Amino acid sequence: MIRWPKSLRSALSSGARRALDPHANHRGYTHLTLGALSRYLAHTSRRHFLKLAAAAVVLTPRWLRAETRMNDACGPPPPPPPAQASGAEGLPPLPLPATPQRRDEKKNPPRPPVIAVKIKNGTVRDWATDLNDLNNLLVWMRATLGVNFTYDQKRLSQINLEAADVPVLYRTGHYEFEFSPTQRQRLRAYLLRGGMIIFDACCGREAFVKSARHEIHQILPDYPLKPIGVDHPVFNCYYQDTGNVRFTPWSRQQNPALRSPGPSRIEGVEVACRMAVVLAPHDLSCGWDLHTHQIPECTYIHSDSALRIGTNLLAYATATRDLSTSASESKAFVDADPVKTDKFRVGQIVHDGDWNPDPVGLRNLLDTVAGTSALKLSFEVEPIPVDAKQLSRFPFIYMTGHESFNWNKDQTATMRRYLTNGGFLFVDACCGRQAFDQSFRKAMSRVLSPLPGASGKLHPINAKHPLLTTFYQIDKVAYTQAAQHRNPERLRHDIPPLLTTQIGGRTAVVYSPFALNVGWRLHPVPYAVGYDAKSALQLGVNTVMHALSQ
């Protein structure tokens, strides 16, 4: 064993203590250490110096040995991505001479497609402390899903956000950050075209979380950032129930409010029935990098939960990236006429959940009603609160949403009077979400319970209900793949699971716990629990025609 001479131990003692302090000024320590070494080596032998140098390689702190000095970096750097190979015969670049590659020589396989780009921002102490995060996640996906992807690391200015080949942007870090106005505009356009951004607070750093929330609001001020429900497809599209996670023991010790297993507390922004932004305030990247730390006030999701969430996020992003439709691209009614006198106004209920998750669906339905029926009407949709004066203007109102909502006593009484006085309420749970379904059933129970004719409930329709024959003769309906997967028993019958309430001998409420509006938009919505486009449009047209005929 090599014994450090007393003179050198004394010279290095204070510097060594500083090296173990993560908050120390390491540059000052470096100068102190190198000065002590130079003074000692001036009086030592060459042989003894070589022994000391060998030991120093092992004992020197990792931050000093690394090519780029980082805090909390764990694991080896990711392997280089495979070289891109074309189908043509490989030839070296000019100038010659060079030996062309023979046909029987082995070529490198083509590089897999890029699924995510990790944003380089600031210093490597911030964005690159988890060197192997995306690499490990993609290795996990290769083993579990049988898919092969790769990733890039670039500064935001180097990423072609206008291209259609960047499904996911990934931004992780510890510290505060800020995008420029130009970058925000580019990111907004990227998100509205179908991209996804994942923000991950490495080590659960609050400074990063605060900056991410601010930037998300600046980029998408018209779409709220909210906790993602555990029934959302991002938590169930491949692995089931990943919204309930395991936190590391250290995290639970630092934050007693965290349960394990418990809600992930991951937040998101949904655009047109597609999760466009994900913010993980508790660390996912260290879980992907297969390590954890015990840093005061820092929180981590356990690796097994983190890898499953990451797999679901990337699988979801690739399946839904073509869904996004901005408001400017929404289809207009073919028969819209601002001066037409026989205009039929539809009120859409505004509530404290996400009341308008898909602005395209209802418009397409009303367009279909106008184009296929003999009605000479021009339809117009207007957002309205649950207010007596507002509701009285509309004989037909529509309501949808993904998340839970709440009506107070006044709103409950107002809706009761509206339905009693002849109003018609048409509702569906967008994407078949459980949170909205539970809230609506609870709200309607309070609305209907005092009414003697309604019995305080919503009742399933039977095969003779006018909703199945008013315009289209509907003998059987078809469902989305997600609906068939989640509810095989409920869908064995040909009668659609619509619920209604009769008040005074007429239909006052029609509710579909399975999504109708995602079918009305005429483009498949992956993971939506609902009807296919044909069945959704037929049921929607029949409901509107039935309401008008009463």
Image (cartoon, rainbow, N blue to C red):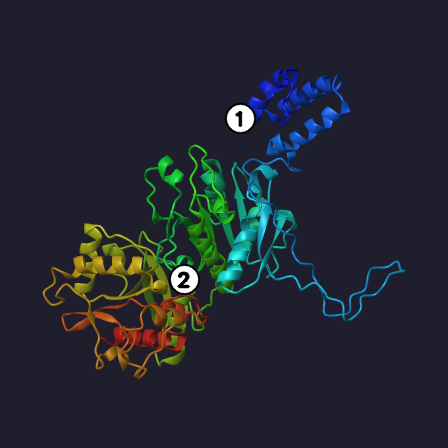
Q: Give the vertical position of 527 relative to 477 (above or below).
A: above
Q: Residue furthest right?
A: 97
Q: Position of residue 99 (x, y in %)?
A: 85, 63
Give amino acid for label 2: Asp
Residue picked out by circle 1: 21
Foreground pick, 313 / 474: 313
Helix, strand or loop status at disc 2: loop
| Residue nearer the viewer, 145 or 226 | 145
Residue 223 seen in the current view: no
Quadrant for residue 540, please give it.
bottom left
Residue 225 is marked as: none
Percent coordinates x, y for residue 239 in the rendering: 41, 60
Mark 1: few, some, or many residues within 10 Å (few <14, many ≥20)?
few
Contact (Cβ within 8 Å) of mark 1 with mark 2:
no
Residue pointed to by mark 2: 358
The residue sitting at 54% across, 52% down in the picture is 136
Residue 534 visible in rendering: yes
Depth check, mark 1 against mark 2: the one in front is 1
Q: Position of residue 308 (x, y in %)?
A: 44, 55
Q: In what element is the residue under mark 1?
A: loop
Left or right, 62 with reference to 479 = right
Name the quarter where the N terminus is drawn: top right
- Residue 104: x and y in percent read 76, 71
Q: Amino acid at mark 1?
A: Asp
Q: Earlier in the sequence, mark 1 or mark 2?
A: 1
Q: CA distance from mark 1 to mark 2?
A: 52 Å
